[in-house]
Image (cartoon, rainbow, N blue to C red):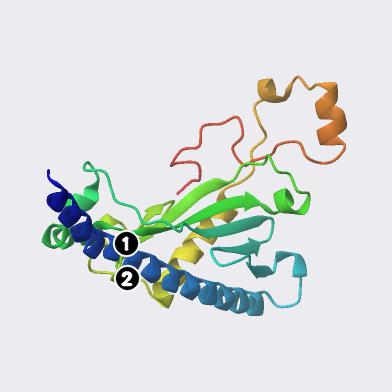
Amino acid sequence: MNNQEIKKGIVDILQTKAVVKQDVFESTKKNFDLLKEVLKKVQHEYNLQLGDADARIHLLFEDKGEFVAQLKVAGDVLVFHMHTNTFEFDRDHEVWKSDYVKAEENNSYCGVVNIYNFLHDSFRYNREHDAGYLIARVFINKEGHYFVEGKRQKGTGINHFGSSIINAENWQKIIETAILYSLEFDLLVPPYDDVKIISMMQMNGEILSSKMQTGKRLGFVYKADDVKQ
């Protein structure tokens, strides 16, 4: 390629793909801000239903910054994190079979909102080595079309990409599905062989400061069937 062809190639990409990626970011950020509003609504709705009987099980929403939000639900915390980059899918992904994407390939570019499940005590006691689990991720494109990969997120999968727009109602369904899964996703006692030996350093530095690593499936393989359907 000569210099003129290289320059034309750069300009073409900047005017097409680069613009699409900026549009995807703006769409994802707008809808992440909407997610925060829905989280506040969910907190209010459920706390009204729970009443004043036991404040320990009340939901608590926290805005942790531009790209992170948290929802405490009893002993669990759901962390919602918006990635700031735009992603494309590998050529083996199901997204390429969608008529919506076949009609316009740029529709495949998506932003991602990840939903993680942590134990509340991991935050309370600053246990930095505790494990969190990705229970869902929401892909959103420049037009606000979306699909969800995750635990029990039925009816919002890749087959609906191009026909479903993310909105407050759909966010609430995603949130409530994630809450229910997390509440039923119990903390299991780790296998005996994984914890039968402990060093003095661990004893002094971790147990005494409540920082021994904990996670719902530490020592186990995290699989799709971890919670009974």
* The N terminus - image quarter: top left
| Left or right of 95 in this view: 26 | right
Decide: is 54 above or below 219.
Answer: below
Question: How many residues crowd mark 2 within 10 Å: few (<14), some (14–19), many (20+)?
Answer: many
| Residue appearing at x 44%, y 64% in the figure | 174
Q: Which label number is shown at residue 205? A: none
Residue type beneath disc 1: Lys
Q: Position of residue 26 (x, y in %)?
A: 39, 70
How many angstroms separate mark 2 from mark 1 (CA)?
13 Å
Under circle 2, the secondary element is loop
Q: Which label number is shown at residue 21? A: 1
Q: Position of residue 161 (x, y in %)?
A: 25, 62
The residue labelled by disc 2 is: 144
Front position in the image: 38 or 228: 38
Q: Position of residue 179 (x, y in %)?
A: 54, 60
Decide: is 42 above or below 7.
Answer: below
| Left or right of 200 in this view: 75 | left
